[in-house]
Image (spheres, rainbow, N blue to C red):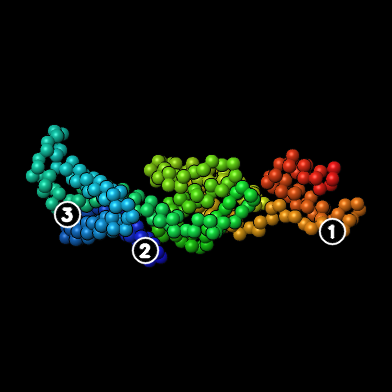
């Protein structure tokens, strides 16, 4: 499994570099290159693109979906080339079969016209979703869970080394950022009194809906604040992350992950029962300690005033 995941990561990074290079050439980057170098680079990109598509089909568990996406990618590439072959300079639409076949047969045209760039985009999304789904299915479902209280399970895998997290954000061309979004969406479903959010759906919305990632960051910040409060940790991240997501988008994932690390490593002190001791001034020492613990829970917002008063009367025998 580890070797498989490493190969998936390598392919996704290679695909990202291929998409970036094909975009640069598509947008006119060949103007600064000698013709021979452009042709060589085009052939290399074309071979890599074909290899990635073949790898995606081979590693996919659902062959029908992977083959369908690959066929769609090929059709997109062909449509891009046919479009350039069927439009004349006078704005009259004409279909010329010989010109279309000539465009398709020239591999550098697939890069220069943007066919490879547009074709690889759906393959990239499909590979990313497959990678995340495989990661989720490979994890033991209930072996690594801790509990804030009886109703709110939190996966202990929310913890991530900050050095690792920052390096991945900086040097994976945004790939880790979207993997992290998928994971955070799942982890923050543990927030109390919040509706369930589908990680795959949120990932796709962040990928394809402009500015949705800013909204996702704000809502995730709110959930992290709730989870921190449930652990007795002070947190007010939502508004700050919203502002930073607009102007410095790399900062919110660092702040949110740091807060999640605090949540994962915090000692669970909720509902601690102190053994009752000897009586001091008509009240037991254990009762005093229990009242102190529940007062702290009240101050941190974990329990309501009514719950505190009820517990106080119960302990004092009123």
Residue 151 image offset from top left, x and y in percent = 61, 47
Query: Does residue 235 appear to the left or right of 75 in the view shown?
Result: right
Quadrant where the N terminus sits is bottom left
Say which residue label 2 marks: 4
- Can you name the residue that lies furthest to the right here? 281
Q: Pinpoint residue 227: horizontal percent, then vertical percent.
A: 60, 49
Residue found at the very far top of the displayed protein: 92
Direction left: furthest residue? 98
Distance in Å between CA atoms under marks 1 and 2: 58 Å
Report if the CB atoms under discs 3 and 2 are less than 8 Å apart: no
Counting other residues with Cα less than 10 Å from the Cα at mark 1, is it few (<14), some (14-19), or many (20 or more)?
few
In the image, what residue occupies the spot 70% across and 44% down? 303
* Residue that badge 1 annotates: 277
Residue sitting at 89 percent across and 56 percent down? 279
**Which of the marked residues, 1 or 2, is nearer the chain's N terminus?**
2
CA neighbours of label 3 inside 10 A, class few (<14), some (14 to 19), many (20+): some
- Give SS at disc 1: loop
Disc 3 target residue: 107
Viewer-proximal residue among 88 and 217: 217
Horizontal relation, residue 232 to residue 51: left or right: right
Q: Nearer the viewer, residue 263 or 284?
A: 284
Q: Nearer the viewer, mark 1 or mark 2?
A: 1
Tell me residue 280's x, y (percent). Answer: 89, 55
């Amino acid at each position: 499994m580890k070797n498989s995941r490493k190969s998936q990561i390598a392919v996704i990074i290679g695909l990202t570099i291929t998409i970036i290079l094909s975009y640069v050439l598509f947008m006119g980057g060949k103007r600064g290159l000698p013709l021979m170098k452009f042709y060589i680079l085009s052939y290399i990109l074309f071979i890599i693109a074909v290899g990635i598509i073949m790898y995606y089909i081979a590693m996919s568990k659902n062959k029908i979906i992977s083959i369908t996406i690959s066929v769609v990618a090929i059709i997109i590439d062909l449509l891009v080339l046919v479009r350039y072959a069927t439009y004349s300079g006078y704005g009259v639409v004409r279909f010329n079969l010989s010109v279309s076949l000539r465009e398709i047969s020239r591999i550098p045209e697939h890069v220069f016209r943007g066919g490879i760039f547009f074709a690889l985009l759906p393959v990239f999304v499909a590979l990313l979703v497959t990678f995340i789904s495989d990661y989720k299915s490979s994890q033991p479902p209930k072996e690594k869970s801790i509990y804030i209280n009886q109703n709110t399970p939190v996966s202990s895998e929310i913890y991530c080394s900050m050095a690792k997290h920052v390096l991945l954000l900086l040097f994976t061309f945004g790939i880790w950022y979207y993997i992290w979004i998928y994971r955070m969406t799942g982890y923050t479903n543990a927030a109390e009194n919040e509706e369930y959010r589908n990680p795959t759906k949120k990932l796709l919305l962040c990928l394809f809906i402009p500015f949705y990632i800013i909204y996702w960051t704000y809502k995730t910040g709110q959930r992290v604040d709730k989870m921190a409060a449930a652990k007795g940790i002070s947190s007010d991240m939502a508004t700050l992350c919203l502002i930073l997501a607009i102007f410095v988008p790399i900062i919110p994932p660092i702040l949110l992950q740091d807060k999640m690390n605090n949540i994962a490593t915090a000692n669970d002190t909720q509902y601690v029962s102190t053994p009752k001791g000897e009586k001091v001034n008509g009240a037991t020492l254990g009762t005093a300690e229990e009242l102190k613990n529940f007062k702290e829970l009240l101050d941190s917002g974990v329990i309501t005033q009514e719950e505190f008063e009820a517990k106080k009367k119960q302990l004092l025998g009123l």
